[in-house]
Amino acid sequence: MKQRLISAAIFSTLGLSLLILQGCATAPPPKAEVAPAPAPAWKQGMGPDMASSKLAPMPGKMTVTAAGEIPIDKLKLPPGFKIEVWATGMPGARAMARGDDGKIYIGTRAIGRVYELSDNGKERTSRVLVDKLVQPAGVAFNNGSLYVMAINKVLRYDGIEKNPSVVPVDLTAKFNLPPEQHHNWKYIAFGPDGKLYVPFGAPCNICELPSPEYAQIRRYNADGSGMEVLATGVRNSVGFDWHPTTKQLWFTNHGRDWMGDDKPNDTLNRMEKTGLNYGFPYCHAGNVPDDVVKKANPCSGVEQPVTLMGPHTAVMGMKFYTGNMFPAEYKNAALVARKGSWNRNQKTGYDVVMVQSGADGKNAKTTPFITGFMNPADQSFWGRPAYLLQMPDGSMLVSDEQLGAIYRVTYSKQQVAVK
């Protein structure tokens, strides 16, 4: 009997030990602490007072939109002007460059393509020239060659208009491109001096710059040599042109987000000389100190804008009108595309405006040119104008990134009489 009791005790102890061991084997390991996912780049700089805001960037429609689906009749222009759908089928269409033989090259951002658009006089057809690049918004044409600039690549297509299958020359190593993606998509153009002008936006909404190579406008020789920094403190310029009489560079610039509905303004700026500072990150729109990134006298020495372009309007491409088709008051005036706000409770922009001023940038006056992309009554929109390109006949092309279309604007006195 005693032996049975001892045996039972031994087995009981062993069983308990086994249960304990089994429990240890099957118990889940302690959970490792997981760091919260970083906020998306567009939320950077959002203050606690806006933590519940539902505002967010609005992606474009990255599928083909047929011409018949575009409500072109909703667009309003001054008397005598006419706008028509000139080409469509190019999702994400942004900046445009015209080749020597008349082909139009169109950069994009989100979709990663560059299009080639051909015109036979009656209709336009397009093809994808290159795909799967990282935001290849920058296109420029010079001496028979197309330049394509993505965030991490520079390609030159020599003789592209006559040789559609030409293999591009890779110039990336020559340009020393900064790597950050945010605000690093580009608008590029060759200036009157034959040099290639390139902006590099700030890699944030608002921040101390991680290195001085951001928030700049530079210029290069066509082969990527001879880099010069022309301006600093430029948060995000994605459109510029040279004044027809002074040959000075004028450029658009985006103000930061999350400072409220009404500040800061986007701006139109003039580069009277090289070496000027336009304020970022300490000062916006010439006289608005930042409320996050601070320093003493933040706006001291900051270049003042030609004019304010509205808060969060997303000013994009600009062109000085130099043709002979439009009325005399348009000669040497700047036409500026405002793609439209996302960081504002009441939408603004979604239009093209005319800015008239002296050649010195003084006494600027802004008036509507193309409206109707957005309905202020219900805040709905269908199009977002992005860039402009003047044609040899004096007409003006306008790209619509939202629908992947290009519109053509013409003027005639007969159209005034009809209206």
Image (cartoon, grey):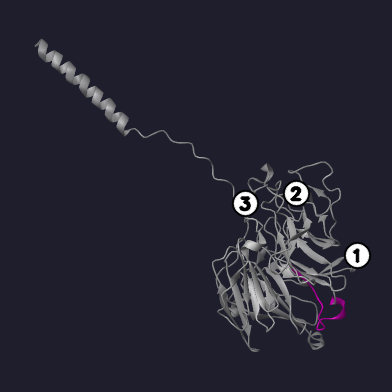
Amino acid, disc 3: Ala
Of 242 and 313, the residue lying toward us: 242
Which of marks 1 and 2 precedes in the sequence? 2
Amino acid, disc 1: Asn
What is the secondary structure assignment of the residue under circle 2? loop
Of 330 and 190, the residue lying toward us: 190
Q: Which residue is mark 1?
A: 363
The numbered disc on residue 281 is: 2
Mark 2–mark 1 Cα distance, whole angstroms, equals: 27 Å
Res. 150 in view: no
CB under 8 Å between discs 3 and 1: no
The quarter in which the N terminus is drawn is top left
Q: Which residue is mark 3?
A: 41
Q: Residues within 10 Å of mark 2 (few under 14, many from 20)?
A: many
Q: What range is drawn magenta here?
A: 316-330
Picture layout, residue 153 above or below residue 75: above
Mark 3–mark 2 Cα distance, whole angstroms, equals: 16 Å
